[in-house]
Image: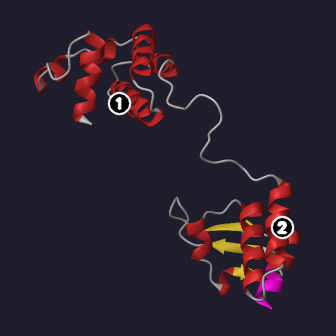
Amino acid sequence: FYLQVRRTCERLQGLPARTLTESDLTAYPWHHVDADMAADYARLVYATYDNVSTRNDTISAMRRLIAGCYRAGLISAARRDEVLDELPTEAPGPSTRRRRLAQVEIEALIKACAQDPLPAGARDAAVIALFATTGMRISELVRIDLADCDLDAGTIVLRATKNGSDHTVYIHPVTKTYLEACLA
């Protein structure tokens, strides 16, 4: 993070790389950065880097500095929001790495599972149906015990979810049929 902060400060001042010291960084008036400076900085970063990940890392350093100024009481929430609005970190356009499956694709996967011999096909269909209807994560799915499933009530208790607490999800009626076939 130190290197990112140093490079951010150098870019803001139009200095070459590796010219500032640690004392220069602490002396810089980060709380004076305004929306125009942030917009210029973002344009420079986008012009310098083609890789979205590198852009986001570089802009995130500035975002963290501005958030720190707000937490320290050096700038108002309105000023923070104004500056952060000029520092986008999302890739423009739709993501090419992930997308939601269309209902037709989900149905095709489940249909393909029906062609597999039992019990693997029934298990796979139940897993696909659970993902499609509950939104649970893989890590939550692998932690499910039979005791966590209450098919009569139509619930599954997810243990130790991403936020660290237990969470109850409701089972869709169609998913319930796949779970029953799997458990049979």
Q: What residue type is labelled 1?
A: Ala
Q: Give how far apart the Cα atoms at labels 1 and 2 are.
A: 43 Å
Using the rendered image of the protein, determine whether residue 153 is visible from the camera's viewpoint.
Answer: no
Q: Which amino acid does label 2 sit on?
A: His
- Where does residue 42 sit, x and y in percent of width and height? 44, 18
Is residue 131 toward the left or the right of residue 23 in the image? right
Question: Label for residue 30?
Answer: none
Name the image quarter holding the N terminus: top left
Front-most of 161 and 129?
Answer: 129
Where residue 7 appears, as percent x and y from the top left, is: 25, 24
Does the magenta run of residues contain 181?
Answer: yes
Relative to 46, is 147 above or below? below
Residue pointed to by mark 2: 172
The answer to which quarter of the image holds residue 47 is top left
Rate crowding at label 2 as few (under 14), some (14 to 19) or many (20 or more) other CA atoms within 10 Å.
Answer: some
Q: Name the residue under label 1.
A: 61
Which secondary structure dominates the residues rendered in magenta?
helix
Asked if residue 73 lies in the magenta stretch, the reply is no
User: How many residues crowd around disc 1 within 10 Å: few (fewer than 14), some, or many (20 or more)?
Assistant: some
The residue sitting at the bottom extreme is 184
Q: What element carries label 2?
A: loop
**Residue at the spot x=58%, y=75% of the render?**
142
Look at 78% across and 68% down and name the residue there: 129
- What's drawn in magenta, residue-wise? 179-184
Q: Is residue 129 left or right of residue 28?
A: right
Residue 27 location, quadrant: top left
Residue shown at the point (78%, 82%) measured from the top left: 116
Q: In this view, does 75 lie to the left or right of 89?
A: left
